[in-house]
Amino acid sequence: MSEAREALNFLEHIIEDDLENGYQKSQLRFRFPPEPNGYLHIGHASSICLNFGLGLKYGAPVNLRFDDTNPAKEETAYVEAIKKDVKWLGFSWDTERYASDYFQQLYDWAVQLIEGGKAYVDSQSSEEMAEQKGTPTEVGTNSPFRNRTVAENLALFSGMKKGDFEEGTHVLRAKIDMGAPNMLMRDPIMYRILNKAHHRTNTDWCIYPMYDWAHGESDYLEQVTHSLCTLEFLPHRELYDWFLDQIYEADKVRPKQREFARRNLSHTVVSKRKLLQLVENNVVNGWDDPRMPTISGLRRRGYTPESIVAFADTIGIAKRENLIDVSLLEFHVRDHLNKIAPRVMGVLNPLKLVITNYPEGKEEYVTAENNPGDSDAGSREVPFSRELYIEKEDFKEEANRKFFRLKLGGEVRLKNGYIIKAESCTKDTEGNITEVQCTYDPKSKSGSGTEESLRKVKGTLHWVSISHAISAEVRLYDRLFTDESPDTHKDKDFMDFVNPDSLQVITAYVEPSLKNAKEQDRVQFQRMGYFCVDRDSTPDKLVFNKTVGLRDTWAKIAEKA
């Protein structure tokens, strides 16, 4: 086996084998088929990258098809959100399709199945049908309506289409085998009555096809060659093929369903039903809350499309499900932001620092690189003055030798500025430090070229000039769930693991270069992490979301593995 062949994932092996055994490369076509009943999440991102990635690899078209067969849960707003997410990730589809495009054809084919004795109208309740279904070890029993005449079935099915019946009175079922080992083959439902307006067809239809009937036939109509689904659809493959058998014509491409495993992300849930529950219970502030695993939530938090695509490529395609630590996703966004994000200074937990020997009223500017790793990023001028903010955590009255920040009698360098020495501090009545008094070495300014400017001290602190600083709301995020697999516990609900401290809102102070920052601008607050301007920002009030910290926890996890 060639080295290139060995590098392929198992789905690519399937495609390569098909190309060697009759498929033409020009025939290849893929699709991404979301249901527009919610927002896309990180799991969908992997499927998007898979299908569109195969399209790019083989030069094949990829359809974006909305499986819109359930008007009770689907909305145009979800359609638009999905299109936005796919585009944001950097992919373009060949054609935009909808299962609802094929409602008439699906109906006509269903009529053909009835005429061929392969489908019938069942008038039992859902409870009765479920009872007759049997179990994995016990065969089912036939419906009392299974042997209705073709004429009776056609009349009833036509009446269902016309709206003559109430919801729940009739369904159309395929006539396969109530003793089949695969329970999905035990006369599955093809159509049900739903008297609800559809987001595209309005009230033209009051019967809607079930997923198993619509999906494979939609693939066939679009001449999709490889219908790639997640592993839970493996038992559905037999039914997928049975339905295709009923309508397949030899001169057409026959779609092939194959399955790959979901990659679950730790400390989150990706079930749309559960995500909707989080939204409806106000646990989060909408589908695009930065704590949500939705693509829109990750985008709002400051994730880049490049980092999500890199994450999907890293975890790859597998045949078995496993749990991916969220730290790997954070690693990829940190890695990308490190390359592109401008460096700025922002103080999140401010402590006032006064340089007592710095002239009162004096202002000057220090030069700061926008991104030391990017020679084309340029530099900016940052205002410096007598009174500054530093982080509270960066000062201690007394500390051991391993504390390389500011302590009484100790020296540090202010980033891009001067070396200072802590002389004293002021406390409130409760003993909390409210101000630190320092002196500075006027000849130690970074970049000045003096001997003193080259003097080495162990600590370097970020800071902002109080008189120039801009106050900003900063939203600090933690894991939304305290448990790494919140929806796998049999004795507890996933909501029991919601982290009550997943959001902390603080007031921070940032340098004035950020005054005109716009939504989605991403920056690194030096020494603190990566942050993104939120859509709630206004010209009068900056709002930042913390995207990810600077510390790479993935490396430690990978080391232990």
Image (cartoon, helix red, strand yellow):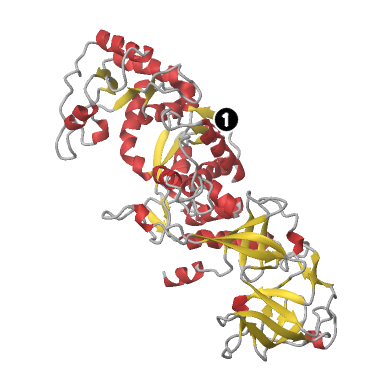
The residue nearer to you, when weighing 281 against 188, is: 281
Quarter residue 165 falls in: top left
Which residue is located at x 27 percent, y 33 percent?
Answer: 184
Q: What is the crowding at mark 1: few (fewer than 14 residues within 10 Å), some, or many (at least 20)?
A: few
Q: Is the residue 527 above or below the residue 420 in the image?
A: above
Q: Is the residue 169 above or below the residue 536 in the image?
A: above
The residue nearer to you, when weighing 252 against 550, is: 550
- Secondary structure category for the residue under label 1: loop
The residue nearer to you, when weighing 86 against 491, is: 491
Which residue is located at x 66 percent, y 51 percent?
Answer: 537
Instruction: Please say whether residue 509 is visible from this viewpoint.
Output: yes
Which residue is located at x 46 percent, y 50 percent?
Answer: 9
Quarter residue 21 falls in: top left
Residue 471: percent from left, percent from top = 68, 62
Instruction: Please say whether residue 60 is visible from this viewpoint.
Output: no
Q: Is the residue 317 above or below the residue 507 in the image?
A: above
Which residue is located at x 29 percent, y 26 percent?
Answer: 189
Q: In which quarter of the image is the C terminus?
A: bottom left
Residue 487: percent from left, percent from top = 35, 53
**Amino acid at the residue labelled 1:** Thr
Quarter residue 410 falls in: bottom right
Residue 261: percent from left, percent from top = 39, 49
Residue 124: percent from left, percent from top = 21, 22
Which residue is label 1 attached to? 95
Q: How many labels does the image show?
A: 1
Q: Is residue 547 rendered to the left or right of residue 490?
A: right
